Image (cartoon, rainbow, N blue to C red):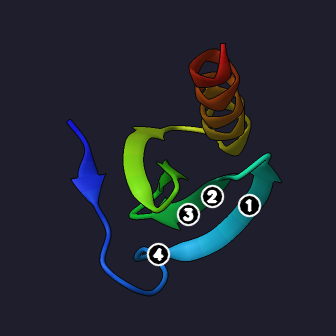
Amino acid sequence: MREGMKKGMPPGDHVFDKKVGRTEVMVHKEKGKFVTYIDREKLDSYNSLSAAKTAGLAYVKQAKQ
């Protein structure tokens, strides 16, 4: 399920990023979908930017517990 990214930015248009502690959450728009990356590893794709942001931040919050 996890796709590791090589050096550089993931594909698509960069639309959101935030650092939560040491973890980096990014959202890129690819082919009409919003794809969430956690530390440059693909998490999932979503239909809206808000859903992608919420899922990424919730994942990081859950992982910290």
Instruction: Name, please, the residue furthest toward the bottom.
Output: 8
Marks 3/1: CA distance? 7 Å
The answer to whether marks 4 and 2 mark residues whose Cβ atoms lie closer than 8 Å is no
Mark 3 neighbour density, 10 Å: few (under 14) some (14–19) many (20 or more)? many
Residue pictured at 57% horizontal, 22% vertical: 63
> Residue 49: horizontal and vertical position, in percent?
68, 45
Q: Earlier in the sequence, mark 2 or mark 1?
A: 1
The disc at residue 8 is none
Which quadrant is home to the C terminus?
top right
Q: Residue 51: name its quadrant.
A: top right
Q: Are marks 2 and 1 in contact (CB under 8 Å)?
A: yes
Residue type, label 4: Gly
Q: Residue at x 39, y 64 (%)?
A: 31
Q: Which residue is identified by label 2?
A: 26
Q: Mark 4 sits on what residue?
A: 12
Q: Which residue is mark 3?
A: 28
Element under label 4? loop
The amino acid type, in three-letter code, at marker 1 is Phe
25 vs 5: above or below: above
Whole-angstrom CA distance, mark 2 to mark 1, is 6 Å
Q: How busy is the neighbourhood of tag 1: few (under 14 within 10 Å), some, or many (20 plus)?
A: some
Q: Earlier in the sequence, mark 4 or mark 2?
A: 4
